[in-house]
Every structure is written in structure tokens, then in C-alpha cells.
């Protein structure tokens, strides 16, 4: 009986959490960012304040979900994120992975789906923070490289979307191209969620039998030079780096599952 009550509460709590998330985004767009436009004229400072605000709001949202009893989490290696100009790659098991990462990463930039720019709940923060839209075509890689070289900490999910509920990973080559052509080393982050929820193909209201437990680990950098020096071809180096990343994140997921 208690388990049924707990599960019913977590369905309601999840609805409350995501409703508040949407309303918060709408208020930022309608009130906060217009005020920021009036007060701060310098575009760079405005972008800095916008990213700082979003990071703070996301930290509150994660704390809100924890307080509601939806999830728990542990984070290790967070000190590795306190450097400028990082290319941060992570696996993508759940809907709130980007919320976790942006709440943790100083001066975070990220690649977002173009559809979010048409969503009234998300387009205001995305535009203010100058997040990179994935519809820029051939210029996407150059935009990402420029972001890292400018000192931004760029967050990318190489899969481009959440991992399918089957667990099969399919990495796109764009993240490896950024690393090779930058060139810039990779700061990998592994995200584990047990029991799995908020994943692709699973409706948000199908909550797991107990609270989600997130384990987020920032790992040692992966140097890109060995891939570039080995092949002397950017295209081949990007392909081999993509294959390496696929094995890397797959192996980490397997080791987590067996632990």
C-alpha cells in the first residue's frame, strides 16, 4: 500500500516539477531577460549573466526535484570542470541530463535542438545564453570550435538525442570533428540513472518503482593528439575517435550496470 502511495506521489511530483520548469522558463523570457536587456548593454556581459542565471535556476530545479522525492544523486570529479575552454561530452540516458550538466558547468554553452527555439518556454533562455542551434548545417562545427576557443565550456551529447530504451548507442561524428579540427581534448562525463526513467520512448508519467538515483562522474580528459598524429587525416581521425568514444561510453555503461 505504501509503495503504491509513494509511486502515485512521484507521478504527481513529476508533473509539478515539469510544470514549474515550463513556467519558470516562460517568466524568464517575459520578465527577467527583457529587464536584462534594459540594464546590461554589453552583449558579452549580457550573455555571461544569462548563462549564470540559467545555471542557478537549473541548480534550484534539481534541488526541487530532490526535495519532491523524485530523485537522488551523487557527483564525483566536479573539480575538473573548473577550467575554461572545455569540450564536455556525455552520454544521454534521461531528459534532465542537460539540466544537471549546465547546473554544474561554469560558463556553459551547449548545442540545442532547433525546435526549442520555437518553444515559448525555452526560446527566451536559449537566445539570451547564445546556445548553439543544431540547424546551422555545415557551420555547426565551426561555431562549436569558436565557442571552445573563446573560453566557453561546450556541452555536447554525441548521440544527438537520448539513448533509446533498448540501450543501443548511436554516436554522431560531429563531436569528434570538433575535437579533431579544434583541436581540443575531450572531458568525458558519464551519467547513470537507476532505475532508468525519463528516457526516450518512455512517457514521463511511467515513474520507476523507486526514486531515480543519478551517478554523475567527470572523468579524466581524453587527448585528441594521438588520433590526429596517427592518421594525419581529419576525416579518418574523427571516425576513429567516434569509434573510440562509442566503446568508451558503452564500456562505462556496462561497468555501471554490473556494479
Image (cartoon, rainbow, N blue to C red):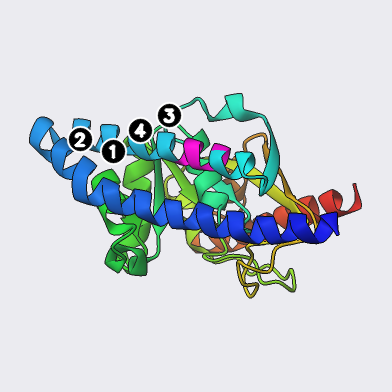
Magenta segment, principal secondary structure?
helix
Label 2, secondary structure: give it.
helix
- Magenta stretch: includes residue 216: no
Q: Position of residue 166 (x, y in %)?
A: 74, 74
Question: Which badge, 3 or 2, is on the more N-terminal residue?
Answer: 2
Residue in front for this viewpoint, 72 or 187? 72
Image mark for residue 84: 3
Residues at discs 1 and 4 in contact (Cβ within 8 Å): yes
Q: Is residue 155 above or below residue 10?
A: above
Looking at the picture, does residue 1 appear above or below residue 213? below
Provide the secondary structure element on which disc 4 rests: helix
User: Looking at the image, which residue is at 45% across and 57% down?
Assistant: 19
Residue 84 visible in the shown view: yes
How far apart marks 1 and 2 lie (CA) works out to 6 Å
Residue stretch rendered in magenta on the structure: 58-63
Could you tell me residue 170's position as x and y percent? 63, 70
**Residue at position x 12%, y 39% from top?**
37
Return the mark for residue 50.
1
Q: Does the residue at mark 1 contact the one at mark 3 (Cβ under 8 Å)? A: no
Residue placed most toward the observer, 39 or 192: 39
Residue placed farthest to the right in the image? 258
Q: Residue furthest front?
A: 1
- Mark 1–mark 2 CB contact (< 8 Å): yes
Between 162 and 243, the residue placed more toward the observer is 162
Direction from residue 251 to residue 136 in the image, left or right: left
For marks 4 and 2 on the same chain, the one whose residue lies earlier in the sequence: 2
**Residue located beneath label 2 in the image:** 46
Which label sits on residue 242? none
Residue topped by disc 4: 52
Amino acid at each position: 500500500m505504501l509503495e503504491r502511495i509513494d509511486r502515485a506521489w512521484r507521478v504527481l511530483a513529476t508533473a509539478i516539477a515539469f510544470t514549474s520548469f515550463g513556467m519558470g522558463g516562460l517568466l524568464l523570457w517575459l520578465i527577467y531577460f527583457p529587464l536584462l536587456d534594459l540594464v546590461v548593454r554589453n552583449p558579452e556581459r549580457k550573455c555571461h549573466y544569462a548563462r549564470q542565471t540559467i545555471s542557478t535556476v537549473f541548480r534550484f530545479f534539481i534541488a526541487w526535484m530532490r526535495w519532491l522525492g523524485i530523485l537522488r544523486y551523487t557527483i564525483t570529479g566536479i573539480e575538473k570542470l573548473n577550467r575554461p575552454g572545455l569540450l564536455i561530452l556525455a552520454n544521454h540516458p534521461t531528459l534532465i541530463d542537460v539540466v544537471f550538466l549546465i547546473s554544474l558547468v561554469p560558463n556553459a554553452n551547449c548545442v540545442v535542438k532547433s525546435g526549442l527555439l520555437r518553444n515559448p518556454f525555452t526560446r527566451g533562455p536559449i537566445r539570451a545564453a547564445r546556445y548553439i542551434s543544431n540547424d546551422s548545417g555545415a557551420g555547426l562545427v565551426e561555431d562549436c570550435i569558436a565557442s571552445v576557443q573563446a573560453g566557453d565550456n561546450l556541452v555536447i551529447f554525441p548521440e544527438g538525442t537520448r539513448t533509446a530504451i533498448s540501450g543501443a548507442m548511436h554516436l554522431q561524428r560531429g563531436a569528434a570533428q570538433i575535437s579533431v579540427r579544434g583541436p581540443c581534448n575531450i572531458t568525458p562525463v558519464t551519467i547513470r540513472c537507476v532505475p532508468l526513467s525519463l528516457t526516450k520512448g518512455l512517457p514521463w508519467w511511467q515513474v520507476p518503482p523507486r526514486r531515480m538515483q543519478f551517478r554523475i562522474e567527470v572523468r579524466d580528459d581524453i587527448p585528441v593528439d594521438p588520433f590526429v598524429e596517427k592518421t594525419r587525416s581529419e576525416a579518418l581521425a574523427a571516425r576513429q575517435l567516434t569509434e573510440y568514444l562509442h566503446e568508451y561510453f558503452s564500456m562505462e555503461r556496462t561497468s555501471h550496470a554490473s556494479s
